[in-house]
Amino acid sequence: MSYVDEVLAKVQAKNASEPEFLQAVEEVLESIKPVVEANEDLYRKEAILERITEPDRQIKFRVAWVDDNGQTQVNTGYRVQFNNAIGPYKGGLRLHPSVYIGIIKFLGFEQIFKNSLTGLPIGGGKGGSDFDPKGKSDREIMAFCQSFMTELSKYIGADIDVPAGDIGTGAREIGYMFGQYKRIKTTYEGVLTGKGLSFGGSLARTEATGYGLLYITEELIKCHGQEMAGKICVVSGSGNVAIYATQKAQQLGAKVVTCSDSTGWIYDPEGIDVELLKEVKEVKRARLTEYAAARPSAEYHEGRGVWSIKCDIALPCATQNELQIEDAKTLVANGVTAVCEGANMPTTLEATKYLQDNGVLFVPGKAANAGGVATSALEMSQNSERLSWTFEEVDAKLNRIMVDIYHNIDDAAKRYDKEGDYVAGANIAGFEKVVEAMLAQGVC
């Protein structure tokens, strides 16, 4: 049995109740086999794969808070500090009822390689809670965030672990958490990213993941003799990533005709009205039915269906495993050229393989959505220097990082005779840098 297969079997036996984590580990380990086989004796002796698939630490804690009716509520908080070989742990905080340790481990594991690909000195981590911010008052959200940070503050710091936002954790939540950290620690440091501009946040951070997704998509298709202008794109989701991916796609001359939320989806053949979508989702925090009601050209449909629309480029920007095998078959039948992931692992392994086998250009989330964490790292740099860069400066750095990521994953795939396999390229490029640092630092 090969070293990869041995470790995969151990991980599967040890984490049998965590399917998302197992999916992420299987995808990475299978695609880095050529690297491992070329160094098998050394990696086995140093237990590299065992060490990289086992978090440095997993922190689980109670979060008690009081709602507006005076009732005490209890949620569970998590922080998984996965690997800090190349820098402080870095990764978002997800607030959603689906959160459990398996979700946080999958996201933290992916973050190791995503952060490595940015070329910036940040390690992999992730956290969150099963708290649901939907329907809660600002006071309730503040009460939760303060309680959550009271415990989390024991384990983080500007040079230790720097959390950020994720699903359910926006500027409001980050602000409340930062205020509580400052109150407890009595220090003013860049311990969180995604902060407001008045207290250490970075311009372009809000737009970064969506913009970065389009910068790498544009470079991908340019290197295959195409251009964004005139392309029809379908986007899933209607949160931060989806909104700014849509905005940048349309700035580049493409037309985005879909968006979605947890209850339904929009098809707008005239192109998604980004300002209206922002009004509905960022200001009113309403459902997409309000978009359809205000936009005569838009059709609202219950349930799933974004991937049924004929398109050139598909950009899944909602959540994990949203693009399944039947969706992949529909996209291929409709002539899709490229699929680039704006969310974390939004395409199932089966669907990914089908897309690749049918000649679709496929860039995984750990490369394609790295713009958010890259700009978070740029925020860390600004905080350390006590500086604030212009939007144009940050956006130019982001563009350069995403273009470099594309060429790094392309080169890595070619080096191991996997040209065009950007999943393998992303995993190999991210893995090689982390392993080099792990070996240099000894057994730790």
Image (cartoon, grey):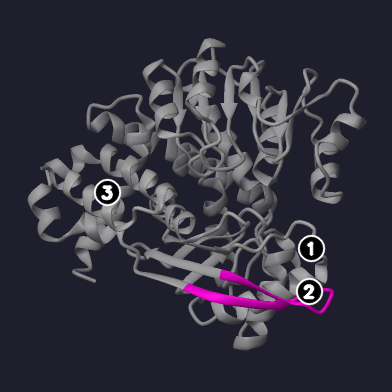
Residue that carries the numbered disc 2 in the rendered image: 67
Give the residues drawn in magenta, as a range: 60-76
Q: Which residue is mark 1?
A: 136
Q: Is residue 316 above or below residue 319?
A: above
Question: In what quadrant of the picture does the C terminus appear?
Answer: bottom left
Q: Is residue 260 left or right of residue 408?
A: right
Label 2 Cα crowd, 10 Å radius (few <14 / some 14-19 / many 20+): some
Measured Cα–Cα span from mark 2 to mark 1: 9 Å
- How far apart are the two marked residues, 1 and 3, measured between alpha carbons? 44 Å
Q: At numbered mark 3, what does the secondary structure look like: helix, strand or loop?
A: helix
What's under tag 2, amino acid-wise?
Answer: Asp
Left or right: residue 35 versus residue 180 is left
Q: In the drawing, what numbered circle is on residue 432?
A: 3
In this view, the residue in front, 35 or 7, is: 7
* Label 1 crowd bin: few (<14), some (14–19), many (20+), radius 10 Å: few
Q: Mark 2–mark 1 contact, CB under 8 Å?
A: yes
